[in-house]
Amino acid sequence: MSSQLALVKRDTVDVVADKVRKFQERGEIHFPANYSPENAMKSAWLLLQSVQTKDNKPVLEACTRDSIANALLDMVVQGLNPAKKQGYFIPYGKNLTFQRSYFGTMAVTKRVTGAEDIDAQIIYEGDEFEFEVIRGRKKITKHKTAFSNIDDNKIAGAYCTIYWADGREYTEIMTIKEIRQAWKKSRQNPDKEGSTHNEFPGEMAKRTVINRACKAYMNTSDDGSLVMTHFNRQDEAIAEAEMEAEIAANANGEIIDITPPVSEKVEQGQSQASPEEPKEMRFDDFSDDIPPVRQAGNGPDSW
Amino acid sequence: MIDIKCLGSSSAGNAYHITDGHTALLLEAGFPYKALQRALNFRMSEISGCLITHEHLDHSKAAKDVMKAGINVYTSQGTADARGLSGHRLKIIRAMEQFQIGTWSILPFDIQHDVEEPLGFLLANTAGDKLVFLTDTYYCRHRFRDLTHIMVECNYSMDIVRERVASGHLHPGQMKRLLKSHFGLEHVKDFLKANDTRKVKEIWLLHLSDGNSDEKRFKREIQEVTGKLVRVAGR
């Protein structure tokens, strides 16, 4: 390992590992028996060495160490492992973020809520689909489909149900309209030719409804735990990183300037501004207001 | 010499009166018309035109009444459509197309806000004053030359926002919108550093957020960065 890389590791992986150890000692976080934060960090570190920014720079060089450490912390506190595709490290300019995949969202939901299963289905046009609302909670009473109904161009909607061992369940249903509305918020342009949303609408619709159900249920628990903080932090961290990257790329560019007319051109300029109705502009007749004419060369050099 | 008066500068309403001694302009009309009249001592007839940046009511509320009073309103097609403005007092202006009101030459330019066609304004007069008016934008694509007056939104500071989200005082959804619609202190500093401010006489900080800002600190920090006279628009 180059000494540079060793320095980055010391400022990120080692710092986060230390933090996590303290959380554990203070009892603020408990990992399931099958999750080893050390292993997850090792996987992440290996992976991070090959992640690159848009302009093909290694993120470990291009991104700030703070943002790398925060991304790692988000991953570990939620008990996720990038090797299981439970999340990805995505750079926005100088900021690295950790983004849960929907597998990751399901894993956290199961762990935090004790849910047993999370299932999602697509509703196709022509399906027999019925649901009831019992005490404000949706319950699917019938979904009968046919093999011939399966058609990615004829998706009517999707639903996701979270099941618990004691028989409780929680369901979210979305119409295709709602799903498409959610896609509009996607960073990838869903309307673009060849977008994942266009090529695999069924899978993407499932993903959307799973995310909706898990997030909605997670947020009904008023659990102020560390896991919840990091679970919800993702959106804000991404929003902030995106904004910073956009500003860094676009802000304070070309100089634009304006040249005030130096002589009687004032009137000319005015009629240019509203050529369609010069007669009506009684109020616009500011000729009295025009100051004493300035000589050229009197003003700043740039005129 | 430009004289700037702030009639209000917050999400409750924005309006500024600027004059170079020859032509007086109203920037924004984000109050009920009666409140505007009172703030201007009922001397509406002295106003030569009203420029409006975007459709949100805290910037455009009185637009229709201002036109009824015989004052031309200059704004983008996007803003006019959103507010339902029409008539001969409405002057549609476009980004990067210069126009003239009395002694002022005005160049509208694109800004970054979550509405259709919002505008910022660069105003210059023959006396050598040059003012940029930049509000409700989270950054500015452009830079400017020989500015003498800067009126720029300075809405929030990231550390205050983060703290308020963590303590539950600011909804994360509101934070996301804020970041992509309003100018934060750190970005305002970058904007000021990117521009040549040697000729600047006054910097006005506009539209400070009620919860996410700190007037004294913002003023001090902008003064430190620029070494200029900084005024915070009274809310």
Image (cartoon, rainbow, N blue to C red):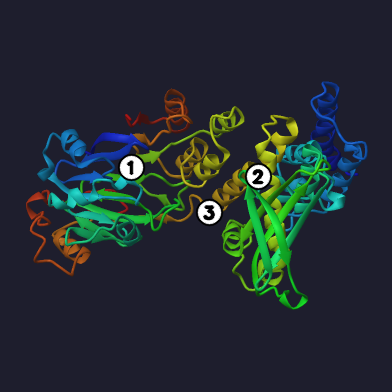
**Marks 2 and 1, how far apart at CA:** 33 Å
The residue located at (75%, 74%) in the rendering is: A146
Task: Please name which of the two marks, 1 or 3, marks the residue nearer to the observer.
Answer: 1
The residue located at (57%, 31%) in the rendering is: B159
- Measured as percent of width and height from the top left, residue B5 is found at 24, 34
- Measured as percent of width and height from the top left, residue B155 is found at 44, 36
Secondary element under disc 1, as helix, strand or loop, is helix
- Measured as percent of width and height from the top left, residue B76 is found at 32, 59
Residue on which the image places disc 1: B58
> In screen coordinates, is A88 left or right of A245?
right
**Marks 1 and 3, how far apart at CA:** 27 Å
> In screen coordinates, is A45 left or right of B34?
right
Residue on which the image places disc 2: A216
Give the chain letter at badge 3.
A
Looking at the image, do the residues carrying marks 1 and 3 touch, with CB atoms under 8 Å apart?
no
The residue located at (73%, 30%) in the rendering is: A225
**Marks 2 and 3, how far apart at CA:** 35 Å
User: Can you tell which quarter of the image residue A256 is in?
Assistant: bottom left
> How many labels, in total?
3
Task: Please name which of the two marks, 2 or 3, marks the residue nearer to the observer.
Answer: 2
Residue type marked 1 = Asp
**Location of residue B163 with respect to B63 vertically, above or below:** above
Residue on which the image places disc 3: A250
